[in-house]
């Protein structure tokens, strides 16, 4: 055989074959996946290479948790599952925190992980990165699947995507062993195994009687209140929700990630009279918000003992999880709000004018109290004074995404920074998890192409701080503000032992986080007063380049656990001195 003939034969054969790597990418493309977030290594490096070669954007991270959080943010923002790609065992486990967090937050996400040789792993013979990943993922996810044959890749990916995005969204794990990625099959036969999902998150219409029941209950209220949760933000039913709220005149309370669904300065918002509204409302309609710890489980004294509840949620088993739900509306929020609107008769729902007046007065009082704190100009800055400078800049840019984590850094930011557009605020969510910061910021920037400002406690930042290299590598328009108070909650605790070791909550004081980003070519700013903070943030946003502002905050300024210090269980013994 001549060399020429041999070359031709090889080329022809190659053209007719495909393998697991290509089929994974083809299956994702067929289902409109445009971005993969991950960390490469054995056995999935070629998945990322093939994806990139085929036009899918691959964003490579420094830690899988951050890649996972980016995918989860993409899921929340787009209503399509974000895809995270991880290596076997440790990489898989690193990603699992984000997958579990996505499930807890009801964000659609798929973690695809390579895994080691089944016949070695299952007999625990000691493989490279040996772990029964399918079993490990199961308790932390909405579902976990494994593909065992190359011809099942299309089915596996289709199933994973549909499971993640349908009903109550969540995190799905898809295990693809190395051997399956390496299997070669006929290209046409392989292509025939792929499937494009039809209507993966189909509408779920409410029962008509459930809609009537909800309207009747709301119409019987004197002091009605509507609570909007991140499920409402996720549903993208912005128009219907706003129309219903404005048509009924019912005051609304946005949960933190629902801020901006209607603008925070909307006259019906009770964000600035939260406690009063919850305590005194006689009928509350929950829309995409669970009655969990974030809402004090609906219990007195935070809520009225006689409050009656309406809950609009896609998950039937959410109903009655805490207090009884008098009017459950099981449906997707868009369909539910449309149905409620279409059944509503003019003037049927009329909040008492005394109720509206009481809320208005409390808002006024609280705003005045807050303004006094915001207008102080202490040196060093505290959270309020720093946030006043940030607020004034962000007020001119409602299009900017705000990512937020920390304890005091979280609470003050949530209360002070108003949001005016839907789905622009991403934070620690249902778990109150630290470490979402840079991942969410990257996910938001990549998905939207818009600027992101991440407002981070210095501790919170540390969980994902290395991703500033990722931000610089992809030139993402992310400005990170580190509220540097020298520790977890504050920087002034002492070691009761009197020894040289710092207290458990304390970090290096006067740390220069701004210098970290300079190592990767980003712009670092070090600010100690409001003027320089205003200038640094304005310049950073104008440049559209990666930047980090080390914002010096009084180390005495914070309180233990911020606004949820009451959740610390303490005894009269306390730490021994
Ligand atoms: P928050 O923390 O903002 O109060 P939660 O995460 O507790 O919000 O609640 C979100 C709720 O929204 C979940 O119970 C979830 O089932 C529900 N949900 C998510 N997406 C939809 C949707 N498209 N339609 C209806 N309900 C939804
Ligand atoms: C994964 C516990 C809650 S808040 C916090 C920690 C470590 C950091 C608070 O300090 P920070 O903010 O960020 O400097 P500030 O402004 O109050 O000083 N590990 C995980 N999640 C959580 N929630 C913790 C630990 C925690
Ligand atoms: Mg701190």
Image: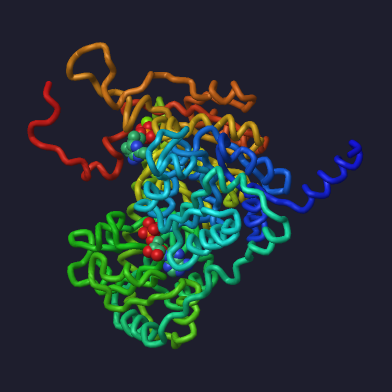
Q: What residue do we see at 53% from left, 73% from top?
A: 202
Based on the displayed image, in which of its 4 quarters is residue 379 positioned? top left
In the rendered view, does 494 fall on the left or right side of 448?
Answer: left
Residue 56: x percent and y percent? 68, 48
The one nearer the camera, 190 or 304, is: 190
- Residue 118 visible to an observer of this rendering: yes
- Residue 407 visible to an observer of this rendering: no
* Quadrant of image for the N terminus: top right
Q: Total label count?
A: 0
Placement of 524 over or under 329, stated as above or below: above
Q: What residue do we see at 60% from left, 35% from top?
A: 471
In the rendered view, does 451 fall on the left or right side of 124?
Answer: right
Color style of the picture? rainbow
Q: Quadrant of ligand 2?
A: top left
Task: Name, please, the residue furthest toward the left.
Answer: 572
The one nearer the camera, 156 or 394, is: 156
Placement of 510 over or under 201, stated as above or below: above
Residue 41: x percent and y percent? 57, 34
Residue 575: x percent and y percent? 14, 27
Task: Name, please, the residue furthest toward the front.
Answer: 1
* Quadrant of image for the C terminus: top left
Q: What residue do we see at 65% from left, 59% from top?
A: 32
Based on the displayed image, in which of its 4 quarters is residue 576 positioned? top left
Residue 218: x percent and y percent? 34, 79
């Amino acid at each position: 055989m001549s060399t020429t003939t041999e070359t031709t034969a090889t080329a022809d054969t190659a053209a007719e074959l495909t393998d697991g790597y290509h089929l994974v990418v083809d299956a994702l493309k067929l289902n409109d996946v445009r971005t993969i977030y991950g960390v490469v290594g054995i056995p999935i490096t070629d998945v990322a290479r093939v994806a990139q070669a085929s036009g899918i954007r691959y964003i490579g991270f420094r830690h899988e948790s951050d890649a996972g959080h980016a995918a989860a943010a993409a899921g929340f923002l787009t209503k399509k599952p974000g895809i995270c790609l991880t290596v076997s065992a440790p990489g898989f486990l690193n990603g699992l925190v984000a997958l579990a967090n996505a499930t807890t937050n009801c964000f659609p996400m798929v973690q695809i992980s390579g895994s080691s040789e089944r016949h070695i792993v299952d007999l625990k013979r000691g493989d490279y990165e040996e772990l029964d990943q399918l079993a490990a993922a199961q308790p932390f996810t909405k579902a976990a699947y494994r593909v065992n044959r190359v011809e099942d890749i299309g089915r596996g990916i289709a199933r994973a995507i549909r499971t993640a995005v349908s009903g109550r969204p969540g995190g799905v794990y898809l295990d693809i062993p190395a051997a399956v990625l390496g299997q070669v099959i006929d290209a046409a036969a392989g292509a025939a195994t792929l499937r494009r999902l039809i209507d993966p998150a189909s509408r779920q219409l409410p029962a008509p009687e459930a809609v009537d029941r909800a309207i009747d209950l709301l119409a019987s209220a004197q002091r009605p209140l509507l609570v909007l949760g991140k499920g409402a933000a996720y549903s993208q039913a912005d128009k219907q929700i706003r129309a219903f709220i404005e048509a009924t005149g019912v005051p609304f309370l946005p949960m933190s990630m629902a801020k901006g669904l209607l603008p925070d300065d909307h006259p019906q918002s009770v964000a600035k009279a939260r406690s009063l509204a919850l305590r005194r409302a006689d009928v509350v309609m929950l829309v995409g918000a669970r009655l969990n710890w974030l809402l004090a489980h609906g219990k007195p004294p935070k809520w009225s003992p006689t409050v009656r509840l309406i809950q609009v949620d896609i998950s039937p088993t959410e109903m009655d999880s805490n207090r009884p739900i008098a009017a459950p509306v099981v449906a997707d929020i868009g369909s539910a709000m449309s149905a409620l609107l279409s059944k509503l008769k003019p003037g049927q729902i009329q909040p008492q004018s005394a109720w509206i007046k009481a809320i208005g007065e409390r808002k006024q009082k609280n705003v005045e109290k807050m303004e006094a704190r915001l207008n102080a100009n202490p040196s060093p800055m505290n959270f309020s004074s720093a946030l006043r400078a940030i607020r004034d800049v962000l007020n001119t840019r409602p299009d900017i995404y705000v990512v937020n984590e920390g304890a005091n850094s979280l609470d003050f930011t949530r209360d002070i920074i108003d949001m005016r557009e839907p789905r622009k605020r991403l934070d620690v969510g249902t778990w109150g998890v630290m470490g979402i910061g840079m991942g969410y910021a990257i996910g938001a920037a990549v998905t939207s192409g818009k600027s992101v400002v991440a407002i981070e406690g210095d501790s919170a930042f540390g969980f994902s701080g290395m991703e500033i290299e990722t931000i610089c590598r992809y030139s993402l328009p992310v400005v990170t503000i580190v509220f540097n108070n020298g520790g977890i909650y504050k920087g002034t605790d002492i070691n009761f032992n009197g020894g040289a070791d710092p207290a458990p909550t304390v970090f290096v004081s006067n740390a220069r986080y701004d210098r970290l980003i300079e190592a990767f070519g980003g712009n670092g700013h070090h600010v100690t007063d409001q003027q320089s903070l205003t200038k640094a943030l304005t310049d950073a946003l104008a440049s559209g380049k990666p930047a980090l502002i080390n914002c010096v905050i009084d180390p005495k300024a914070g309180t233990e656990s911020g606004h949820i210090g009451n959740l610390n269980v303490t005894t009269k013994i306390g730490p021994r001195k």
